[in-house]
Amino acid sequence: MKASVQRCSILGVVVLAAATVGLHGASADLPVMDGVPTAAAEAVGMSSARLARLDGVMRAY
């Protein structure tokens, strides 16, 4: 009984680790969306400089 619980626990950890590694690059595989409207940051009330800083922080995270 104890061995089967331990085996199931190890299997669960391995499956979660594999899923985490597999999903790590999932966002990079998203398709390019054609036809989505775009605008300059300033045209919608945002700052290009602040968005650039935010982008750097998010990529470093």
Image (tube, helix red, strand yellow):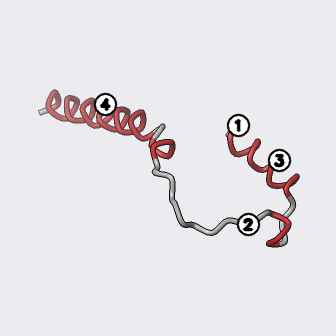
C-alpha separation, residue under disc 1 versus residue under disc 3:
11 Å
- Pick the quarter of the image with the C terminus: top right
Instruction: Report helix, strand or loop for mark 1.
Output: helix
Instruction: Point out the frontmost of discs 4 and 3.
Output: 3
Q: Which residue is mark 1?
A: 60
Of pointers 4 and 2, the one earlier in the residue sequence: 4
Instruction: Point out the frontmost of discs 1 and 3.
Output: 3
C-alpha separation, residue under disc 4 versus residue under disc 3:
37 Å
Is 5 above or below relative to 33? above
Q: Which residue is mark 2?
A: 39
Amino acid type, residue under disc 4 in the picture: Val
Instruction: Point out the frontmost of discs 1 and 2.
Output: 2
In this picture, residue 48 sits left or right of residue 2: right
Amino acid type, residue under disc 1 in the picture: Ala
Q: Which residue is mark 3?
A: 53
Which residue is painted at 38% across and 33% down in the image? 17
Find the residue positioned furthest to the left.
1
Which residue is painted at 35% across and 39% down in the image? 19
